[in-house]
Image: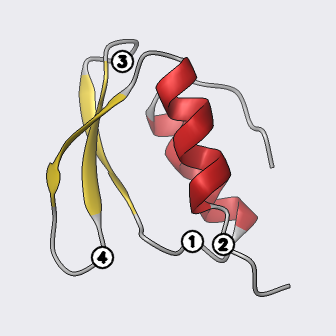
Amino acid sequence: MGASFTPELKKILSSAGCYFERQGKGDHEVWYSPITDCRFVVDGSMKSRHTANAVLKQAGLPKAF
């Protein structure tokens, strides 16, 4: 444990057509999903696979972790 899910999550999001929109507070980034037409937050160092899967759900993608 201890590794961040963020790098892999960003790869999945990018390959699905989602993209980085702007920097949020601290190490958070705001991303946009054309699938759901929604913005969502990606934490700079996501330690929980549940959180990573929740982000994928917001982006309209299936669980991956």
Label 3 SS? loop
Up the image or down, 19 lies above or below 25; here it is: above
Q: Secondary structure at mark 2?
A: loop
Say what secondary structure mark 4 lies in. Answer: loop
Which residue is rendered at x = 66% and y = 72% of the image?
4
The answer to whether 30 appears left or right of 63 in the picture is left
Residue assigned mark 3 = 36
The mark lying in front, picked from 2 and 3, is: 2
Is residue 60 at all visible to an observer of this figure?
Answer: no
Between marks 1 and 3, how big is the CA–CA gap? 22 Å
Circle number at residue 46: 1
Expressed as whole percent of the image width and height from the top left, the position of residue 32 reads 27, 31
Q: Please, what is the three-letter code of the amino acid marked with disc 1?
A: Met
Graded by Cα atoms within 10 Å as few (under 14), some (14 to 19) or many (20 or more), the crowding at tag 3 reads few
Q: Is residue 22 visible?
A: yes
Q: Is residue 23 left or right of residue 35?
A: left
Residue reaching furthest to the bottom: 2
- For image coordinates 76% across by 87% down, the residue present is 2
**Which residue type carries mark 2?**
Ser
Q: Are marks 1 and 2 in contact (CB under 8 Å)?
A: yes
Frontmost residue, 21 versus 38: 21
Image x and y of residue 31, in percent: 29, 41
Marks 1/2: CA distance?
5 Å
Q: Position of residue 26 (x, y in %)?
A: 21, 81
Q: CA distance from mark 4 to mark 1?
A: 10 Å
User: Nearer the N terminus, badge 2 or badge 3?
Assistant: 2
For disc 4, the marked residue is 27
Residue furthest to the right in view is: 1
The kind of secondary structure element at disc 1 is: loop
- Using the numbered discs, state the Cα–Cα distance from disc 2 to disc 3 in whole angstroms: 25 Å
Q: Which quarter of the rendering shows the N terminus?
A: bottom right
Mark on residue 4? 2
